[in-house]
Image (cartoon, rainbow, N blue to C red):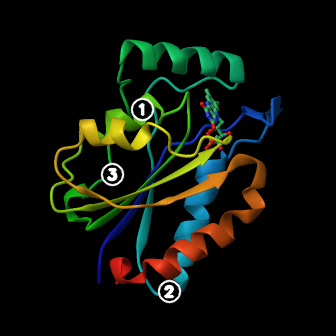
């Protein structure tokens, strides 16, 4: 049986949903999607571990402060320090990598993760939650940092339609079951 990891970055607290700043609570959209994905994989009898990619210096609650820091990091190409893990990364065959679209790409903390983990021999499945721009530049930005690894097509979930996340994930699983087994 394949060993599956779901690594994700997510920002709870304030977010911009349909042009309005809203507190979406402590569990961000990508974290919710990651949990739904794990639930579906486990229901198929597969084992899938969750791992949250976290910046050592957490992003603030405020949308504006987070947006400013994220923009600055992107402009400067900063890769913020992240917490270590997951343990035993080398043992995973398939890595789902989830993140929100931030400024047209993934948060820089995701690049901190991809550039410090050896993906050789692994299949990487990106998934994104977004305000309309889907993956945009994130795949090429991730690819540029990767040591090995084979990126395949993942899935995208709209932040304004999180109720549809389960259907998107089930659909992806149905169309990609040979990768999982
Ligand atoms: C700092 C920041 C920048 C964002 N930039 C974009 C963007 O450029 N394009 C887009 O479609 N959505 C953008 N969004 C919306 C998020 O991608 C979306 O709300 C996502 O679901 C948030 O996921 P999370 O709760 O897991 O962090 C941005 C959100 C934040 C907080």
- Residue 103 seen by the camera: yes
Q: CA distance from mark 2 to mark 1?
A: 31 Å
Tell me the residue at 58%/75% (across/down). 171
> On the rendering, which quadrant does ligand 1 occupy?
top right
Place of residue 46 in the rendered image (x, y in percent of width and height, measured from the top left): 42, 81
Place of residue 156 in the rendered image (x, y in percent of width and height, measured from the top left): 57, 55
Residue under numbered circle 3:
86
The quarter of the image holding the N terminus is: bottom left
* SS state under label 1: helix
Instruction: Count neighbours of disc 1 (C-alpha within 10 A) and say few if under 14, some if 14 to 19, many if 20 or more.
Output: many
The numbered mark at residue 109 is: 1
Are the residues flagged by discs 3 and 2 in contact, CB closer than 8 Å? no
| Mark 2 vs ligand 1: CB below 8 Å | no
Instruction: Give the image quarter of residue 37.
Output: bottom right
Residue under numbered circle 2:
44
Mark 2 or mark 1: whose residue is earlier in sequence = 2
From the viewer's perspective, is 13 left or right of 98?
Answer: right
Tell me the residue at 60%/40% (across/down). 133
Query: Can you say whether 20 is above or below 38 in the image?
Result: above
Are the residues flagged by discs 2 and 1 in contact, CB closer than 8 Å? no
* SS state under label 3: loop
Query: Can you say whether 179 is above or below 74 in the image?
Result: below
From the viewer's perspective, is 78 left or right of 129?
Answer: left
In the image, 111 versus 19, the foreground residue is 19
Tell me the residue at 55%/84% (across/down). 43
């Amino acid at each position: 049986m394949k060993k599956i990891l779901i690594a994700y970055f997510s920002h709870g607290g304030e977010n911009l949903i349909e042009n309005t700043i809203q507190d979406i609570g402590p569990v961000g959209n990508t974290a919710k999607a990651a949990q739904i994905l794990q639930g579906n994989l486990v229901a198929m009898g597969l084992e899938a571990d969750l791992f949250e990619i976290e910046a050592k210096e957490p992003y603030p609650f405020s949308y504006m402060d987070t947006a400013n820091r994220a923009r600055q990091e992107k402009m400067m190409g900063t890769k913020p320090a992240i917490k270590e893990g997951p343990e035993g990364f080398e043992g995973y065959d398939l890595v789902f990598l989830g993140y929100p679209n931030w400024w047209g790409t993934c948060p820089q903390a995701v690049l901190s993760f991809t550039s410090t983990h050896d993906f050789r021999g692994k299949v990487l499945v990106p998934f994104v939650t977004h305000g309309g721009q889907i993956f945009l530049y994130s795949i090429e930005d991730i690819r540029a940092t990767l040591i090995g690894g084979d990126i395949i097509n993942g899935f995208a979930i709209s932040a304004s339609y999180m109720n549809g996340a389960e259907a998107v994930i089930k659909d992806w699983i149905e169309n990609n079951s040979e990768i999982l087994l």
